[in-house]
Image (cartoon, grey):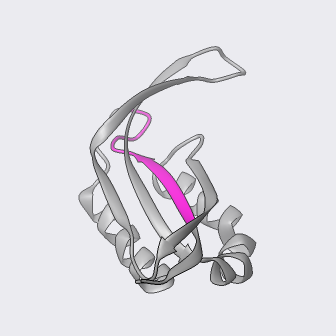
Protein backbone atom coordinates (compact mmCIF):
# COMPACT_ATOMS: atom_id res chain seq x y z
CA UNK A 1 0.00 0.00 0.00
CA UNK A 2 1.28 3.46 -0.79
CA UNK A 3 0.76 6.60 1.24
CA UNK A 4 0.79 10.07 -0.27
CA UNK A 5 1.12 13.59 1.11
CA UNK A 6 -2.24 15.33 1.00
CA UNK A 7 -4.09 18.17 2.63
CA UNK A 8 -7.37 17.67 4.44
CA UNK A 9 -9.62 20.67 3.85
CA UNK A 10 -12.47 20.93 6.36
CA UNK A 11 -15.43 23.26 5.79
CA UNK A 12 -18.44 23.64 8.07
CA UNK A 13 -21.62 24.96 6.50
CA UNK A 14 -24.84 25.92 8.28
CA UNK A 15 -28.13 24.19 7.59
CA UNK A 16 -30.06 27.47 8.06
CA UNK A 17 -29.59 31.08 7.10
CA UNK A 18 -29.00 33.56 9.94
CA UNK A 19 -32.70 34.48 9.87
CA UNK A 20 -33.68 30.85 10.52
CA UNK A 21 -34.83 29.85 7.02
CA UNK A 22 -33.59 26.41 5.95
CA UNK A 23 -30.89 26.43 3.31
CA UNK A 24 -32.15 24.67 0.17
CA UNK A 25 -30.71 21.20 -0.44
CA UNK A 26 -29.77 22.34 -3.95
CA UNK A 27 -27.09 24.64 -2.44
CA UNK A 28 -25.34 21.63 -0.93
CA UNK A 29 -25.73 19.51 -4.06
CA UNK A 30 -24.20 22.31 -6.16
CA UNK A 31 -21.25 22.56 -3.79
CA UNK A 32 -20.75 18.79 -3.75
CA UNK A 33 -20.59 18.75 -7.55
CA UNK A 34 -17.95 21.50 -7.35
CA UNK A 35 -15.89 19.46 -4.86
CA UNK A 36 -15.97 16.43 -7.17
CA UNK A 37 -15.11 18.48 -10.25
CA UNK A 38 -12.33 20.58 -8.72
CA UNK A 39 -10.90 18.31 -6.02
CA UNK A 40 -11.90 14.80 -7.05
CA UNK A 41 -14.35 14.12 -4.21
CA UNK A 42 -15.53 14.93 -0.70
CA UNK A 43 -16.99 13.40 2.44
CA UNK A 44 -20.10 14.91 3.99
CA UNK A 45 -20.14 14.38 7.74
CA UNK A 46 -23.68 14.12 9.06
CA UNK A 47 -25.76 14.47 11.22
CA UNK A 48 -25.46 18.20 11.73
CA UNK A 49 -23.18 19.33 14.53
CA UNK A 50 -24.32 21.95 17.02
CA UNK A 51 -22.25 24.90 18.18
CA UNK A 52 -22.44 28.49 19.32
CA UNK A 53 -20.30 31.53 18.63
CA UNK A 54 -20.32 35.08 19.93
CA UNK A 55 -20.07 38.06 17.59
CA UNK A 56 -17.30 40.35 18.85
CA UNK A 57 -18.94 43.65 17.94
CA UNK A 58 -22.41 43.05 19.44
CA UNK A 59 -21.84 40.25 21.92
CA UNK A 60 -24.77 38.39 20.34
CA UNK A 61 -24.53 34.60 20.57
CA UNK A 62 -25.43 32.64 17.45
CA UNK A 63 -26.52 29.00 17.40
CA UNK A 64 -24.98 27.04 14.55
CA UNK A 65 -26.26 23.74 13.24
CA UNK A 66 -23.83 22.74 10.53
CA UNK A 67 -22.78 20.03 8.13
CA UNK A 68 -19.07 19.37 7.76
CA UNK A 69 -17.30 18.60 4.53
CA UNK A 70 -13.89 16.97 4.36
CA UNK A 71 -11.92 17.07 1.15
CA UNK A 72 -8.61 15.26 0.64
CA UNK A 73 -6.50 17.10 -1.92
CA UNK A 74 -3.07 16.17 -3.21
CA UNK A 75 -0.60 18.51 -1.53
CA UNK A 76 0.89 19.98 -4.71
CA UNK A 77 -2.54 20.65 -6.19
CA UNK A 78 -3.67 22.24 -2.93
CA UNK A 79 -0.66 24.57 -2.74
CA UNK A 80 -0.70 25.52 -6.43
CA UNK A 81 -4.41 25.73 -7.14
CA UNK A 82 -6.53 25.76 -3.99
CA UNK A 83 -4.60 28.11 -1.68
CA UNK A 84 -4.53 31.01 -4.16
CA UNK A 85 -8.34 30.75 -4.47
CA UNK A 86 -9.33 29.78 -0.93
CA UNK A 87 -10.27 33.31 0.12
CA UNK A 88 -12.54 33.55 -2.93
CA UNK A 89 -14.19 30.20 -2.10
CA UNK A 90 -14.90 31.30 1.48
CA UNK A 91 -16.30 34.65 0.31
CA UNK A 92 -18.53 32.85 -2.23
CA UNK A 93 -19.80 30.50 0.49
CA UNK A 94 -20.46 33.40 2.89
CA UNK A 95 -22.48 35.16 0.21
CA UNK A 96 -24.31 32.06 -1.05
CA UNK A 97 -25.19 30.80 2.44
CA UNK A 98 -25.81 34.36 3.76
CA UNK A 99 -23.34 33.99 6.63
CA UNK A 100 -21.12 36.36 8.58
CA UNK A 101 -18.41 33.69 8.74
CA UNK A 102 -17.61 30.22 7.43
CA UNK A 103 -15.44 27.85 9.47
CA UNK A 104 -12.67 26.47 7.29
CA UNK A 105 -9.36 24.90 8.19
CA UNK A 106 -6.85 22.54 6.68
CA UNK A 107 -3.83 20.54 7.67
CA UNK A 108 -1.26 18.22 6.15
CA UNK A 109 -2.00 14.52 6.27
CA UNK A 110 -0.50 11.36 4.88
CA UNK A 111 -3.20 9.26 3.29
CA UNK A 112 -3.62 6.10 1.32
CA UNK A 113 -3.60 6.77 -2.39
CA UNK A 114 -7.04 6.85 -3.99
The x and y percentages for residue 71 are 47, 67
Q: Front-most of 8 and 95?
A: 8
Question: On the rendered image, what quadrant is the C terminus found in?
Answer: bottom left
Q: Is residue 17 left or right of residue 53?
A: left
Q: Which residues are magenta?
A: 8-19
Count of marks, rendered view: 0
Q: Quadrant of residue 55?
A: top right
Question: On the rendered image, what quadrant is the N terminus found in?
Answer: bottom left
The residue drawn where x is 43% and y is 28% is 51
The residue drawn where x is 49% and y is 47% is 98
Q: Front-most of 21 and 91?
A: 91
Q: Where is 24 relative to 60, above or below?
A: below
The residue drawn where x is 73% and y is 82% is 80
Residue 21 seen in the current view: no
The x and y percentages for residue 14 are 40, 43
Q: Where is 76 relative to 93, above or below?
A: below
Q: Front-most of 32 and 73?
A: 73
Residue 48 in magenta? Answer: no
Q: Quadrant of residue 40?
A: bottom left
The x and y percentages for residue 76 are 68, 83
Amino acid sequence: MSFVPKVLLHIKLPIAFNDGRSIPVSYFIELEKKFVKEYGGYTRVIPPSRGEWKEKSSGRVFLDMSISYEVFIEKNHFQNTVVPNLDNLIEELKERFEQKAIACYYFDVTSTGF
